[in-house]
Image (tube, rainbow, N blue to C red):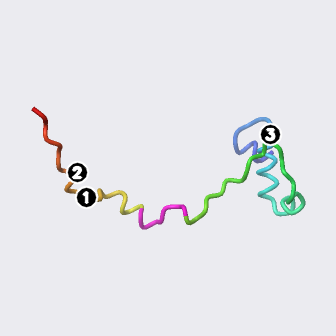
Amino acid sequence: GNAARDNKKNRIIPRHVLLAVRNDEELGKLLAGVTIAHGGVLPNINPVLLPKKNEKVATKEPKSPSKATKKSPKKA
């Protein structure tokens, strides 16, 4: 019910059941080997693939300011 409410849906679908089961410790242990049809998977991004905090500051500044000021020559 909470997963459906969080997504502003009126009906509980298998995806909501899966999210509730996998996020709950006791239900997760009880239904550890169970596959829920049309449930999908839990969203998970490996931390190695996420951008580092140091790179966010570097991406705001242009990498090479000389390229930003140069314009391509007009063809006659």
Taking the image as shown, residue 65 lies to the left or right of residue 39, namely left
* Numbered range of the magenta stretch: 49-55
The residue lying furthest to the left in this view is 76
Callout 3: helix, strand or loop?
A: loop
Label 1 environment density (alpha carbons within 10 Å; few <14, some 14–19, many ≥20):
few
Name the image quarter holding residue 31. Answer: bottom right
Q: CA distance from mark 2 to mark 3?
A: 51 Å
Q: CA distance from mark 2 to mark 1?
A: 7 Å
The residue lying furthest to the front in this view is 76
On the image, the x and y values in percent for residue 7 come to 70, 42
| First in residue order: circle 2 vs circle 3 | 3
Q: Are marks 2 and 1 in contact (CB under 8 Å)?
A: yes
Q: Nearer the viewer, residue 52 or 49?
A: 49
Magenta segment includes 66: no
On residue 68, which mark appears? 2
Instruction: Return the residue at label 1.
Output: 64
On residue 13, which mark appears? 3
Callout 2: helix, strand or loop?
A: helix
On the image, the x and y values in percent for residue 38 come to 79, 42
On the image, the x and y values in percent for residue 62 come to 29, 56
Q: CA distance from mark 1 to mark 3?
A: 50 Å
- Give, as a three-letter code, the residue at label 1: Ser
